[in-house]
Image (cartoon, grey):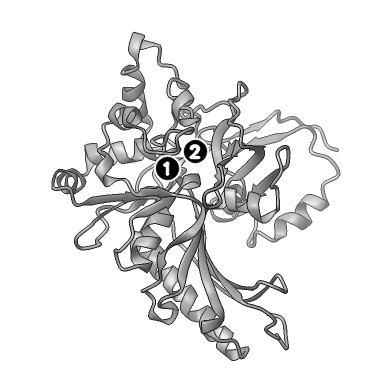
Amino acid sequence: MPENVKKTGPLIGAIDEGTSSARFLVFDVLRRKVVALHQIEIKQKYPQEGWVEQDPMEILQAVIACIEETVKKMKNLGLSVSDIKAVGITNQRETTLVWDKETGEPLHNAIVWHDMRTTTTMEGVLDSIPNKTRNKNYLKPLCGLPMSPYFSALKIRWLIDNIPRVKQAIDAEKCAFGTVDTWLIWNLTKGQLHVTDVSNASRTMLMNIETLKWDPLLCRFFGIPQHILPEIRSSAEIYGFVANPEILANIPIAGCVGDQQGALLGQLCLKPGQAKATYGTGCFLLYNTGNTKVDSTQGLITTVGYKIARAPAVYALEGSVAVAGAALSWLRDNMQLLSNITQTQDMAERVRCSGDVYFVPAFSGLYAPYWQQDARGYCIFPLSRFLC
């Protein structure tokens, strides 16, 4: 933390809820500096091979704890919470949560974006495509996405088919669905808002990529009732006001964007042709295509980059890789080849050449450009006795 921090402008709070951790950061707008932050790791659960879950309450409690600890750090620096003019949210995308609208209780653990349990569900959906073509791109003209367990619609379908209390809550019209942003906004406003933004909605396979609204045809195709879906808003507007935790009470929630699109914005890739690549749990390359929706013929997906208030939406092409930093965790935790991930840099710098040996960590299938969900495990090839 910088010493002798001097506040020179209004402050903005940012909730960053990723796959591996939650953070709350406070920025000095004029100095463009982070003045306080706190981060907490979020556990991932693996109940079966290919399944990845997280506890929705753990996510929420971690976010609230990050806010509380960051506020303490602000006070130690002589900064006032009253100087926080707005809060924004960025989040892991596609991760699917359902909860009871009346009690706020989660109906199941969150199904994380790289969970592969819906592979069988997807096979059944592909069989329902007219003329039995099993075309993975059948819905792409409507939603911009190929058929894949990655996206939220199949996760919702699995919950309806396999978790009785979800089906019961839907029949009683008291089930709410959301990605992590929706879950957080719901709880931050004490159940007053059930909303998402266009960037997160574009990852569900249920939003029409041109109208930016929930598409009745897509909802019928997956058998998902529209009454469980949140209202779609822009990525930058005042959605409502924080009520929980009370230390941020009445501060407006004024921004919401999926984490990879948020990185596109954060790196100021605001012009068509500009792109950014982010390496985290996975790896994601987003290429700004402006207000023009571009359909890829090379296995990329079409997504909404962001939408600022009433301005037209900005689109992007995305190349998605499921496993990047997660492979380093695997080397540490499963293979025990290192004790700390930071060791990987030194190890890589000491290698003169790779000998053309490649490691393909297809733990969650292959995403762009292949979209091959049945790829499993990993490949190391071509091995030989050659030494650099």
- 307 versus 24 height, above or below: above
Q: Say what amino acid the circle numbered 2 marks.
A: Ser
The image position of residue 183, as x and y in percent, is 36, 58
Residue to which mark 2 is pinned? 364
Choose between 164 and 275: the one closer to the eye. Answer: 275
Q: Say what amino acid the circle numbered 1 marks.
A: Asp
* SS category of the residue bearing label 1: loop
Choose between 318 and 190: the one closer to the eye. Answer: 190
Residue in the picture at 47% in, 43% down? 114
Please indicate whether residue 1 sits to the left or right of residue 192 in the image.
right
Name the disc covering residue 115, or none. 1
Looking at the rendered image, the quarter that the C terminus falls into is: top right
Please indicate whether residue 230 sits to the left or right of residue 148 in the image.
left
Choose between 323 and 25: the one closer to the eye. Answer: 25
Looking at the rendered image, the quarter that the N terminus falls into is: bottom right
* SS category of the residue bearing label 2: loop
The image position of residue 368, as x and y in percent, is 58, 31
Mark 1 crowd level (few <14, some 14–19, many ≥20, 10 Å Cα): many
Please indicate whether residue 79 sits to the left or right of residue 6 in the image.
left
The numbered mark, 1 or 2, whose residue comes first in the sequence reads: 1
Res. 357 image quadrant: top right
Residue in the picture at 58% in, 48% down? 261
Res. 156 image quadrant: top left
- 181 versus 369 height, above or below: below
Residues under numbered marks 1 and 2 in contact, where contact means CB atoms less than 8 Å apart: yes
Residue in the picture at 27% in, 46% down? 228
